[in-house]
Image (cartoon, rainbow, N blue to C red):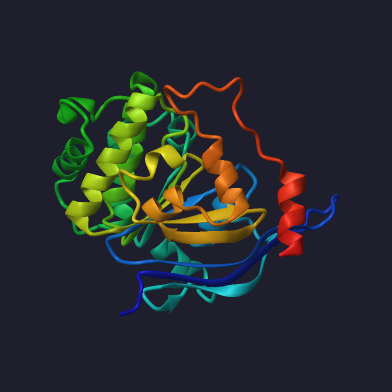
Amino acid sequence: MTPLLEVENLRIHFRPEDRPEIEAVKGVSFYVEEGETLAVVGESGSGKSVSAQALARLLPEPPAVIESGSIRLRGREILTLDEAGLRKVRGKEIAYVFQDPMTSLNPVYSIRSQLAEVLRLHRPEVRDLDAEITYWLDQVGIVNAAARLRSYPHELSGGMQQRVMIAMALCARPALLVADEPTTALDATVQHQIIDLLARLQAEHRMGILLITHNFGILRGIAKRVAVMFRGDIVETGPVAEILEHPAHPYTRALIDCIPRPGVKRRRLASIDHAALAAEAARA
């Protein structure tokens, strides 16, 4: 059976006018099945978000250049689509939730206006916009959803803003949700609430999720498999429990070793020696 999303040998370079060329993604391959979550884990700068944004061709080209590879959604090649084809994919088939909702929500438009725009564009058959918007706000746990239609982003807490972003992403009924660090700006309690929410909505709507994160601590509650990225390459992939308990790559072991553990006495947190890891990878 064909996976929902297949990425093969994706290579992405950046060619800024006044700086040397950067090889950001070095031939990564991964897939997401319908109804499953694949987590991509790594530090900032490892290539996670660049790979995720390439799925719907969101990277500005130039300076970004997709050197080679294939991105197929339900067997259809994304990299050969024209602008009209990409507009049909973005939001409707592949939706995104980013890490900072305040920079994603428009501060001068009400919550209703912003969700209504998504529905008019991707689901023009919907006649009762208020009922549909209220339904999705209720789905993501917004209390007294009908009263929030006229609210503006600044009137909501960070956790509620992120719930609104999830409602905006899901109201178009996408096949794949790309959640790019969706809990980074939130406190620990709200982080787990958002992850639990995504897991519940995924089970109800059978969508695939690509979860981009640097936080191993949130994986067990939602992800089936995990891919570890280091310097633009996927160095290890497998079931979450197996990777967490028996990491094979030294970078994965270093990431896991950095996780604070309550009750474990340690003078200072472990850090990652990138030079040593790069040297070890080169020898391998």
From the viewer's perspective, is 279 left or right of 2? right
Q: Quadrant of the N terminus?
A: bottom left
Closer to us: 232 or 72:
232
Question: Is residue 182 visible in the rendered structure shown here?
Answer: no
Which residue is outermost to the front? 265
Could you say which quadrant of the image residue 70 lies in? Answer: bottom right
> Percent x, y for residue 94?
39, 59
119 left or right, relative to 79: left
Q: Position of residue 34 (x, y in %)?
A: 29, 66
Q: Does residue 85 appear to the left or right of 147 in the view shown? A: right
Q: Name the side, left or right, on which 27 lies relative to 18.
A: left
Residue 30 or residue 111, whichever sits in front: 30
Quarter of the figure with residue 38: bottom left
Which quadrant is the C terminus positioned in?
Answer: bottom right
Q: Is residue 138 above or below residue 127?
A: above
Along the viewing direction, whichever of 49 and 160 lies nearer the viewer? 49
- For the point 26% across and 46% down, the residue is 199
Going 27% across and 61% down the picture, which residue do you hit? 35
Image position, residue 227 (x, y; %): 49, 57
The answer to whether 126 is drawn above or below residue 132 in the figure is below
Where residue 113 appears, as percent x and y from the top left, is 31, 37
Q: How many labels, in total?
A: 0
Residue at figure coordinates x 17%, y 45% from the top left: 132
Residue at 18% across, 30% down = 145
- Whether residue 15 is visible to the viewer of this picture, yes or no, is yes
